[in-house]
């Protein structure tokens, strides 16, 4: 075999190995994002119009999340929040619309105390998606009902459902106390 042929074979082999490594790396990165974001991965793919754009967006969310100072709550504060949630639920029978608004406020306060920015709804979704992607659909559904209830366009059953949805995120935020 001539030297030129050997060099060509080595170059082709190196290109094939590099392509295989790149494919495996991209596959592992995609799997990581799917695992971390859960259903939010597919939602973002739909919204962004493809996997590449969605993955770029999700990685940006991860990078932003790394800059947040997410903290654990002391046991006493967790207990106080749990009691506050019980109070909100008790008020539901007499004031369902107000209870949904109170639940939204309580979730926002809990997020804020944990270290999540709470300025605007869309930003909250993006920040929560990194650690709580599996409960975001609950939050979206609850928020939608809350918005409609402000204009009196939500039924009592929808308001009850909103409370269940808020509770899913609330409990996760309250009990997810891993150190970051």
Image (tube, rainbow, N blue to C red):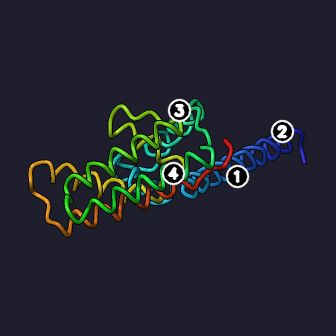
In this picture, residue 13 sits left or right of residue 72: right
Q: Give how far apart the Cα atoms at labels 2 and 3 are.
A: 50 Å
Callout 3–callout 4 Cβ contact below 8 Å: no
> Which of the two marks, 3 or 4, is nearer to us in this view?
4
Q: Earlier in the sequence, mark 3 or mark 4?
A: 3
The residue carrying mark 3 is 64
170 displayed left or right of 104: right
Residue 177 versus residue 115 in the image, above or below: below
The residue lying at 26 percent from left, 55 percent from top is 99
Residue indicated by mark 2: 4
Q: What residue is pinned by disc 1?
A: 20
> Disc 1 and disc 3: Cα gap in Å?
30 Å
The residue at 48%/50% (across/down) is: 81
Structural distance between the alpha carbons of marks 2 and 1: 24 Å
Whether the residues at callouts 4 and 1 have beta carbons within 8 Å, the answer is no
Q: Could you say whether the residue bearing mark 1 is in a helix, strand or loop?
A: helix
């Amino acid at each position: 075999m001539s030297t030129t042929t050997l060099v060509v074979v080595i170059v082709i082999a190196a290109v094939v190995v590099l392509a295989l490594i790149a494919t495996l790396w991209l596959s592992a990165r995609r799997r990581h994002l799917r695992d971390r974001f859960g259903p939010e991965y597919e939602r973002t793919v739909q919204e962004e119009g493809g996997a590449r754009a969605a993955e770029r967006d999700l990685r940006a969310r991860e990078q932003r999340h790394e800059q947040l100072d997410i903290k654990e709550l002391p046991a006493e504060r967790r207990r106080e929040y749990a009691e506050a949630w019980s109070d909100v639920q008790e008020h539901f029978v007499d004031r369902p619309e107000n209870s949904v608004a109170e639940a939204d406020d309580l979730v926002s306060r809990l997020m804020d105390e944990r270290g999540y920015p709470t300025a605007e709804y869309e930003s909250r979704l993006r920040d929560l998606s990194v650690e709580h992607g599996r409960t975001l659909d609950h939050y979206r559904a609850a928020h939608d009902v809350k918005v409609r209830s402000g204009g009196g366009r939500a039924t009592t059953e929808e308001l009850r459902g909103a409370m269940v949805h808020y509770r899913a995120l609330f409990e996760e935020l309250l009990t997810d106390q891993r150190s970051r």
